[in-house]
Amino acid sequence: MENRTWAIHGYYYTFDKMLGSGKFGYVYQARRYPDNKQFAVKAVPLVAGSFGDLYQNTMPILEEFRKIRELAAISYHIIYVYDFGFDSEKSLAYFVMEQGQQDLKKYLSYRALLTSADRKSKWRQLTDIAVTLNDYRIVHGDIKPQNLIVFPGMHIKLCNLGMIKQAFPKNGPSGTPPYSAPEVIIPNSTTILTTKADVWSLGAILYLITYRIAPHFGEPYYRPPSNQYPSRDPDLNDILQRTLVFNPNKRPTPSWIAPHFGEPYYRPPTNQYPSRDPDLNDILQRTLVFNPNKRPTPSWLAKHRYTKTH
């Protein structure tokens, strides 16, 4: 399909090169005419057959387009799809999407170990994705580095919702080991997937970000590679131990992991400088602490200089 031009709703897209491929289609870099803007276009093959077959196969893709648009309006970390179309003659559906720089797997392969701040920044973005899916009771089941696109400013967006469903019984193996949860890879007759399957995926990606290698598929799943020491960050180790658990009922929920490992909570918004008031900053740093045992008591706060002088 490279170097070919396709018409989608009155615009012409010339496919330059393939950016990636997966179980649900191929993604190409494309340039739109007449405005010459660049996009990523996902081409999804449809099962050939009668018009009824084509209609039946198109309905899930239309639902995916609708759901992506809905989620992208809520979370900055879901990729935005500008347009959708399908070609009945070629049995292809097209998603016209915003184009990032590269997927997370390639991003990590080109860089040295990340700083603690960079690692936490990416973790916070991953939890935003998980919480958004959880709020809609959507189980993705196949969140992996190849599905996470890095944009300028180190922003991460989920680009592939091909497996999304609400919590549902599992009929057969699917997903991508070791990033998909064990119940996705090795389901049994009683398996019902929940959003805790995606909690496993986040833990596996955090493991990759930390150790630069995917976790092994054997208990304890969170143990570091044999040639590396465990991270010195106790919060990170706690997250890995809680998320990379075989039994999904023993994993935390997306809403539980969202505030964990997100310190420093007192940091100002990215578009603002810290307050110039040292007493105020001290209060924020002492109160916005994940461990409750490290927070001051109300009586201590009442005696603080910020309380008495402001």
Image (cartoon, helix red, strand yellow):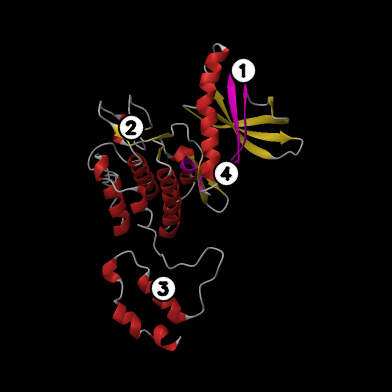
User: How far, Cα to Cα, is label 1 from label 4?
Assistant: 29 Å
User: The disc labelled 2 sits on which kind of residue?
Assistant: Val
Task: Give the residue at mark 2.
Answer: 184
The percent position of residue 214, horizontal first and vertical second, equals 35, 40
Residue drawn where x is 55% and y is 19% of the image: 55
The percent position of residue 82, horizontal first and vertical second, equals 62, 38
State which tag comes first along the sequence, 2 or 3: 2
User: How far, Cα to Cα, is label 1 from label 3?
Assistant: 59 Å
User: How far, Cα to Cα, is label 2 from label 3?
Assistant: 42 Å
Residue drawn where x is 25% and y is 29% of the image: 190
Instruction: Give the label on residue 101, or none.
Output: 4
Q: Nearer the viewer, mark 4 or mark 2?
A: 2
**Towards the viewer: 210 or 33:** 33
State which tag comes first along the sequence, 3 or 4: 4
User: The disc labelled 4 sits on which kind of residue?
Assistant: Gln
In this picture, residue 280 sits left or right of residue 192: right
User: The disc labelled 3 sits on which kind of residue?
Assistant: Leu
The percent position of residue 271, horizontal first and vertical second, equals 56, 64
State which tag comes first along the sequence, 2 or 1: 1
**Does the magenta portion include 94?**
yes
Instruction: Please tell me whether mark 2 sits on a helix, a strand or a loop.
Output: helix
Q: Is residue 67 above or below residue 1?
A: below
Residue drawn where x is 34% and y is 83% of the image: 302
Q: Nearer the viewer, mark 3 or mark 4?
A: 3
User: How far, Cα to Cα, is label 3 from label 4?
Assistant: 36 Å
Residue drawn where x is 41% and y is 65% of the image: 265
User: How far, Cα to Cα, is label 2 from label 1?
Assistant: 32 Å
Picture quadrant where residue 197 is located: top left
* Mark 1 Cα shell of 10 Å, populated few (<14), some (14-19), many (≥20): few
* Mark 3 Cα shell of 10 Å, populated few (<14), some (14-19), many (≥20): some
State which tag comes first along the sequence, 1 or 4: 1
Task: Give the residue at mark 3.
Answer: 284
